[in-house]
Image (cartoon, grey):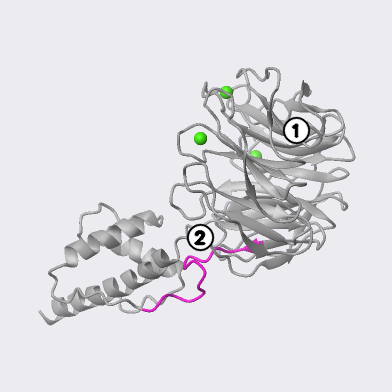
Amino acid sequence: MQRKKFKKLVLALSLAFVLSLFTGVYAAFASICFFPATNFAVGFFPVGVTAADFNNDGNVDLAATNLFSANVSVLLGDGTGNFGAATNFAAGNGPNGIVAADFNNDGNVDLAVTNQFDDDISVLLGDGTGSFGAATDFVVGNTPFAIVEGDFNNNGNVDLAVVNVADDDVSVLLGDGAGNFGAATDFTVGNGPVGITTADFNNNGNADLAVTNLIDNDVSVLLGDGAGNFGAATDFAVGNGPLGITTADFNNNSNADLAVTNVSDADVSVLLGDGAGSFGAATDFAVGNFPFGITAADFKNNGNADLAVTNLFGADISVLLGDGAGSFGAATDFAVANGPRGIVAADFDGNSRLDLAVANSGSNNVSVLLQQVYGCSSTPAPAADITVSNGNNAKAVTMTMQKKLYDLGFNPGPIDGIYGPKTQKAVLQFLKSQDLPLKGM
Ligand SMILES: [Ca+2]
Ligand SMILES: [Ca+2]
Ligand SMILES: [Ca+2]
Ligand SMILES: [Ca+2]
């Protein structure tokens, strides 16, 4: 009897505690904050960055291309947002774009980088311990810049597509699933292609390509035929100096959309897709000085895709929260180091909130920015007065808590008002993610 009473009390206290934290979270929901950047040294002039688990320990790792040291730096994550010292693996001359995927279907993540000064790409096969074999190079066009991976011929093997700045085309290389790639097939785009992304823009099950043309101030969209070929480019106007490009569904209508950084306009152009391969007129959203890299991710875990942009001359990044209708709120800027270019979103500290990593070309390091779950407060909000002492409203309160846990990405089991093992587990995971004491639970 005593024990039962004690358990009830503990539950009541726990509920009050957890709900007060949620109050704090929701009060700050309209904003986003990251803890100050932690910088990790890499090679000379890092430009590209990608994230994946290279040593199969469940923690997200980083890889960055060092343009002037002809190598790739790999930093293994410890799952708390920290990274070990960089290990460097040789690539070609001028490694720039980088992509991580499993090219030889052995379950270990591999890397491919564009060698801007060699007119080829280097493929480095991962061994699953965080190490990589010697690079194998495959010829592409003149001055390859950005790179994407996808299955362009629908055979289950990862393929690659690269923009060649000096050739005004895209090289597509089909993978054999054993780590090798066939000869490049080139597809014409606009003038000065620098950025590339892939999605199924016409909803026919075949991957398509979209490319930023820096000189033409537009985006070329090439529809894939599912056999590794692409149709003629259709161009869509954006702002001045389009460079970075990413894709996501910004208005939640299941059609892939595009977002592009315009370096000369200090803004981002968003183009909403019609699901048939066409796009509406660009809507522009202001960001920082010389916006370069861009990534789309749902930072708020609210189902709406957001954007994060590196501002090359601003030494900062701009984050724009999406409203799920294709529009974005005002940019919030976060300091990084000098010359930020590549950017990638991933959950580095395992709290189900997406963080960011940025390659700082002028500082020879990578900035890691961990997202604050409490919005812009570094400490939890003070406890709110929520009373569940009599048990009268415990069910409703528990249901509210379960729903909020669910919304935040923790699985509380059925939202039924019953504080069962699954709900308790979710509460514990939530508390742990906040570095909060588990005493009394
Ligand atoms: Ca790892
Ligand atoms: Ca592999
Ligand atoms: Ca398609
Ligand atoms: Ca859409």
In the rendered view, would you say 181 is above or below 386?
A: above
Q: Is residue 311 left or right of residue 285?
A: right
SS label for mark 2: loop
Pinpoint residue 244: horizontal percent, then vertical percent: 71, 43
Label 2 beta carbon within 8 A of ligand 1: no
Q: Residues within 10 Å of mark 1 (few under 14, many from 20)?
A: many
- Identify the residue shown where x is 47% and y is 42%: 325
Say which quadrant the C terminus sits in.
bottom left
Say which quadrant the N terminus sits in.
bottom left
- Amino acid type of disc 1? Val
- Identify the residue shown where x is 59% and y is 26%: 207
Q: Is residue 312 left or right of residue 326?
A: right
Query: Which label lies toward us, 2 or 1?
Result: 1
Q: Quadrant of residue 144?
A: top right
Which residue matches tag 1? 162
Which residue matches tag 2? 350
Per the model, the C-alpha gap separating discs 2 and 1 is: 32 Å
Range covered by the magenta-colored residues? 368-382
Nearer to me, 364 or 336: 336
Question: Within the magenta stretch, is there residue 397?
Answer: no
| Residue 240 visible to an observer of this rendering | yes
- Amino acid type of disc 2? Gly
- Residue projecting furthest to the left: 1
Pinpoint residue 216: horizontal percent, then vertical percent: 79, 32
Q: Is tag 2's residue or tag 1's residue first in the polypeptide sequence?
A: 1
- Residue projecting furthest to the bottom: 2
SS label for mark 1: strand
Q: Residues within 10 Å of mark 2 (few under 14, many from 20)?
A: some
In the rendered view, would you say 149 is above or below 434?
A: above
- Identify the residue shown where x is 59% and y is 25%: 278
> Could you tell me what secondary structure mostly forms the magenta stretch?
loop
